[in-house]
Amino acid sequence: MVRLDFGSQQQRSPQYLRVNPKGRVPALVTDRGTLTETPAILQFIAQSHPAARLAPLDDPFELARMTWARRCTSRTRTACAARALSRVIAAEESAA
Ligand SMILES: N[C@@H](CCC(=O)N[C@@H](CS)C(=O)NCC(=O)O)C(=O)O
């Protein structure tokens, strides 16, 4: 995980703009490409780690409802992504 310092505008640095040309966080670099929108990142994490039970993957309606709710709560999305990622990292570290 890489933390950016907004105070020094690191989100606009040439290095970060190569990761996310929009200059916004979060961004998740995966083996298949980079995701730059929080709902997509959350869904990717949840589907990549089903055992962590981060989303109702077995209920298409509930998953759709949750995805829409995430889009509507713009201020909390980044915090949700960080929390979900932390849970996955913690679970993987304790399994290692
Ligand atoms: N549509 C993006 C929005 C992300 C976003 O606005 N992130 C804010 C932080 S909460 C940001 O990076 N701001 C930096 C800036 O505006 O310079 C998403 O859903 O992830």
Image: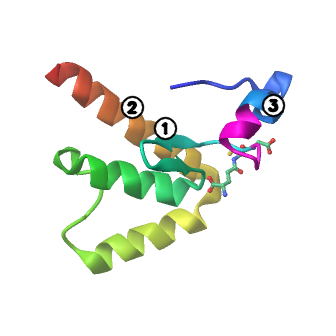
Asked whether, in this view, residue 65 is left or right of residue 3, the answer is: left
Q: Is residue 69 above or below residue 22?
A: below
The residue that label 2 is drawn on is: 86
Asked whether, in this view, residue 84 is left or right of residue 37, the answer is: left
> What percent of the width, then of the height, locates residue 95?
15, 24
Q: Secondary structure at mark 2?
A: helix
The residue that label 1 is drawn on is: 82
Q: Which mark is residue 14?
A: 3
Q: Is residue 71 above or below residue 81?
A: below
Q: Is residue 2 above or below residue 72?
A: above
Label 1 close to label 2 by CB (< 8 Å): yes
The part of the chain drawn in magenta is 16-23
Residue at the limit of the structure toward the front, as seen here: 32
**Residue beneath the point at 19% across and 21% down:** 94
**Residue beneath the point at 52% across and 42% down:** 28
Label 3 close to label 2 by CB (< 8 Å): no
Check disc 2 and give the amino acid type.
Ser
Q: State which tag comes first along the sequence, 3 or 2.
A: 3
Q: Secondary structure at mark 3?
A: helix
